[in-house]
């Protein structure tokens, strides 16, 4: 991979990588850690990531110190990532799960190349090509960067 892509990542990718050891999710998270991808968050997407991770960590990580280390790591992701102010953005009809609009809005404001998600029910995969980004799942993203 020679180009550093600008990406917005759905919370499910983080959760599947951290808690279910999904290989492609872990590969993507490793690329972020090594700063091979540019990552962006909106105020809503970073909030969701912290909220969901806190709840998952309480069920899957027994040690308080390990849970806090993970949540601290999210703060570092946010610090090194870009921030997109998405306040007041309009609805996107094709997004069925309106809670996932935060990723679309972030990608629009950030000028992302990709939204990476494994949520096929959200409607994000049905977006028009008028946007600067494509919505891909983790398998497709890994395939694309290895071409």
Image (tube, rainbow, N blue to C red):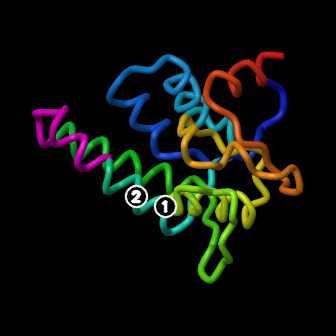
Q: Which mark is residue 48?
A: 2
Q: Which residues are magenta?
A: 53-64
Percent position of residue 8, x then y: 63, 49
Residue 60 relative to residue 42: left or right: left
Residue 126 included in the magenta stretch of the image: no
Q: Which mark is residue 60?
A: none
Please, what is the dominant secondary structure of the magenta stretch? helix
Percent position of residue 14, x then y: 45, 38
- Which mark's residue is nearer the viewer, 2 or 1? 1
Picture residue at 37% right of the left edge, 30% below the top: 18
Percent position of residue 112, x then y: 76, 52
Q: Quadrant of the N terminus?
A: top right
Tell me the SS state at disc 2.
Answer: helix
Picture residue at 78% right of the left edge, 23% below the top: 144
Residue located beneath label 1 in the image: 99
Q: Residues within 10 Å of mark 2 (few under 14, many from 20)?
A: some
Q: Front-most of 10 and 126?
A: 126
**CB within 8 Å, label 2 to label 1:** yes
The relative height of residue 139 versus residue 106 in the rendered view (above or below) is: above
Residue 92: quarter of image: bottom right
The relative height of residue 41 versus residue 140 in the rendered view (above or below) is: below
Picture residue at 62% right of the left edge, 74% below the top: 85
């Amino acid at each position: 991979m020679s180009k550093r892509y600008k990406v917005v990542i759905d919370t499910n990718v983080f959760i599947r990588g951290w808690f279910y050891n999904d290989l492609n999710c872990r590969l993507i998270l490793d690329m972020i850690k090594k700063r091979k991808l540019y990552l962006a968050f909106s105020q809503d997407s970073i909030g969701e990531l912290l909220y969901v991770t806190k709840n998952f960590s309480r069920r899957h990580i027994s040690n308080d110190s390990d849970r806090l280390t993970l949540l601290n790591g999210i703060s570092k992701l946010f610090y090194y990532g870009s921030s997109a102010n998405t306040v007041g953005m309009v609805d996107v009809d094709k997004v069925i799960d309106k809670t996932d609009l935060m990723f679309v809005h972030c990608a629009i404001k950030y000028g992302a190349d990709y939204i990476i998600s494994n949520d096929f029910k959200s409607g994000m995969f049905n977006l028009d090509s008028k946007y600067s980004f494509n919505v891909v799942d983790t398998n497709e993203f890994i395939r694309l960067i290895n071409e």
